[in-house]
Amino acid sequence: MKFRTEVDIKESEKKIRLEDKIFSIGSCFASEMSDLFSQGQLQSMNNPFGTVFNPFSISNAVKRLHDAEFYHEDELITFNDEFISLDHHTSFDTRYIHQTLNKINAQIEEGNTFLQESDWVIITYGSSFIYEFLPKKKLVANCHKIPQKFFEKRLLSHQEITDSIYNTILNLNDICKDDVQILFTVSPVRHTKDGMIENQLSKSKLITAVHEAIQQFENCYYLPVYEMVMDDLRDYRFYKEDMIHPNNQAVNYIFEKFGNAYFGDETKGFIKENFKINKALEHRTDDEKDPKYIEFKEKLNQKIEAQRQKVKHKIFPNA
């Protein structure tokens, strides 16, 4: 007898290898998945524009990365004595214009280089809603807590969403490796501030548009992450205290499902061992001269060195 409707990710013919590079962009859920790639010591880069939710802004970010187009002073605005870009997350805001531009443009340069070598791209859409900054008549990625009166909120049209997805794919196919695999997900994080009905409408528009767009490309796939949380893990024990964001248990469950579909046996073993090493590195002692602790550290360093021999890129740089 079954007591839940389990949702699986279809197994991929192509597998993620130890030296593959994974680029991810999108909502905060994309960051959580990317963190697990990093803990597993795979080569990954996440959100060079910071957290971005809507398809239009993600398409804009990918285009700037593709073109290696730097930002200039006239593209920034000032608010609360800080220089900010409405295309970026608040983590880029600083009190000095050159510092903001340096942070932004360094990420564009790094992102452009990484994309050229990327084997996998994971895009996580969070919302169909977008805000227009009225003084500049500009669609923005982030409102930076600027008063609501300066913005107009609306849903992106179906055509705007599909065009954004299509243009994103074209730019990625042009800059990434020839056999790049592009994986689309819709974030399971519910945007309750939009309203529950509005959130469902927003998510459904994303899911519909993604399925419509990827039919035109052989290297694009949809991962049912939203469905896994909404249907498979339909219980608040899999959420954080805010009852909106999936908790670590849910994220790890999805990552395991993803790994079963996209990791080969060698990659699975590599990541599993690195997770164990990361856990061991968290161990602290009051007496570093304790013989047992010294023995523990020696064995741990041997495991790290054994893992390092398996790949060409640097792993555990701080160990």
Image (cartoon, grey):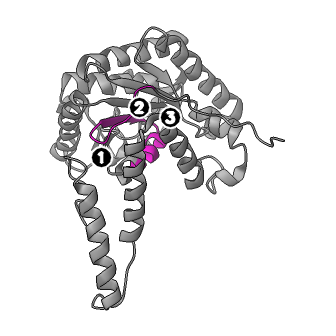
Asked whether, in this view, residue 89 is left or right of residue 261, the answer is left
Question: Which corner quadrant holds the C terminus?
Answer: bottom left
First to last magenta residue range: 13-36
Q: CA distance from mark 1 to mark 3?
A: 39 Å
Q: Nearer the viewer, residue 194 or 18?
A: 18
Q: Nearer the viewer, residue 231 or 272?
A: 272
Q: Is residue 133 visible?
A: no
The location of residue 88, given as percent across then percent down, is 34, 37
Q: Earlier in the sequence, mark 1 or mark 2?
A: 1
Q: Is residue 251 visible?
A: yes
Q: Earlier in the sequence, mark 3 or mark 2?
A: 2
Relative to residue 215, is residue 37 depicted above or below? below
Asked whether, in this view, residue 127 is left or right of residue 101, the answer is right
Helix, strand or loop status at disc 2? strand
Q: Earlier in the sequence, mark 1 or mark 3?
A: 1
The location of residue 61, given as percent across then percent down, is 32, 27
| Residue under the image location 44 percent in, 25 percent down | 13
What is the three-letter code of the residue carrying label 3? Ala
Mark toward the viewer: 1 or 2:
2
Helix, strand or loop status at disc 3? helix
What is the three-letter code of the residue carrying label 1? Asp
**On the image, numbered disc 1 is attached to which residue?**
93
| Residue under the image location 42 percent in, 66 percent down | 279
Q: CA distance from mark 1 to mark 2?
A: 26 Å
Q: Are marks 1 and 2 in contact (CB under 8 Å)?
A: no
Which numbered marker is on residue 122?
Answer: 2
**On the image, numbered disc 3 is attached to which residue?**
261
